[in-house]
Amino acid sequence: MEYKKREKPTELEVLEVLDARMQLSEKDKQHLYKLKKGYEGELAFDELTRNLRCDCLALNDLLLQVGSTTFQIDTLLIADMLYLFEVKNHEGDFYFENDRILTKTNYEITNPMNQISRSESLLRQLLQTLSVTTQINSSVVFINPAFTLYQAPLDKPFILPTQVNRHMKQLNSLNSRITKKHKAFADKLVSMHLTESPFKRLPDYSYGELRKGVVCRGCGSWNMINKWTNCICMHCNKVVDFEETVLRSIQEFKLLFPNRKLTTKEIYDWCGGIASLRTFSRVLEKNFNKLGNRRWTYFE
Ligand SMILES: [Zn+2]
């Protein structure tokens, strides 16, 4: 059973919003692509663990700390022992040589074995501090069906795309029993989960340089107009609820500028003035707490 759900990484969310509102450098674009791809792979694996019928608890995405060292776990399955998974969504042809994974053009990708051994060893240390003794079974799952690894070593805990289903079947046949003790342990780990990742790598951005307006979720056009309680895309004719659109824009605004005060003028400007100040004020008053007064009014 899914005990902890995976959240979309803030870094990915921020980059997606920035990508729409400014010109990202090639490097940032690649980083965004990598994060997106990684997240999609993890979601695909969550789908598989969610369907497991054996008695188990799946903790998806844990960011933990032991001493002053932070480590991240893609998936931790609590069953008869701990199953630690590192999920990789690489696509294409790769080959394994001298403990390295390379593309056909000799471009090297990070060897997930290093990542998983590090996570395993730190998890072991963490278990010690919690006085929990259990075995840990670690593996790297290559989830993308279009991934091929030539010269794949037999002695590494790799689960290749063609082996994923068989592996899930094996887990299904486990004779595990989840007790209160397991649940308490899972709760403990969830409570230790850090929400702010220290690994964020974001480009510099400022309010002034970002494109203002409302973007159509259907076609990506910025040509949206407000009509009564709706927003209409002038490019693909998609109709969406105005309030919902404004609230989504406010979410983006708060995500990018957590320290900026939310005011009617600010949101009016952020949304490219697609409706009157009064209309924006109504949405804010309905959904947020009004603080301060008159020209100093802001919302939280
Ligand atoms: Zn559209």
Image: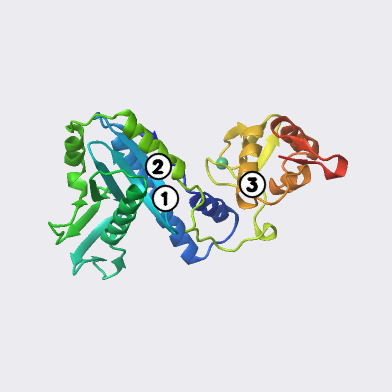
- Residue 5 visible, this angle: no
- Residue 84 visible, this angle: yes
Q: Earlier in the sequence, mark 1 or mark 3?
A: 1
How far, Cα to Cα, is label 3 from label 2?
A: 29 Å
Q: Nearer the viewer, residue 117 or 94?
A: 117
Q: Amino acid at mark 3?
A: Lys
> What percent of the width, then of the height, locates residue 89?
31, 51
Instruction: Give the foreground label among 1 and 3.
Output: 1
Circles 1 and 2: CB atoms closer than 8 Å: yes
Is 25 placed left or right of 163 in the picture?
Answer: right
Residue drawn at the location 55% of the way across and 46% of the way down: 220
Is 151 placed left or right of 138 in the picture?
Answer: left
Residue drawn at the location 16% of the way across and 59% of the way down: 152
Q: Amino acid at mark 2?
A: Leu
Neighbor class of circle 2 (other Cα within 10 Å; few <14, some 14-19, many 20+) is: some
Q: Is residue 267 above or below residue 49?
A: below
> Which image quadrant for residue 204?
bottom right
Q: Which residue in the protein does label 2 denote?
A: 189
User: Residue 254 has which mark?
Assistant: 3
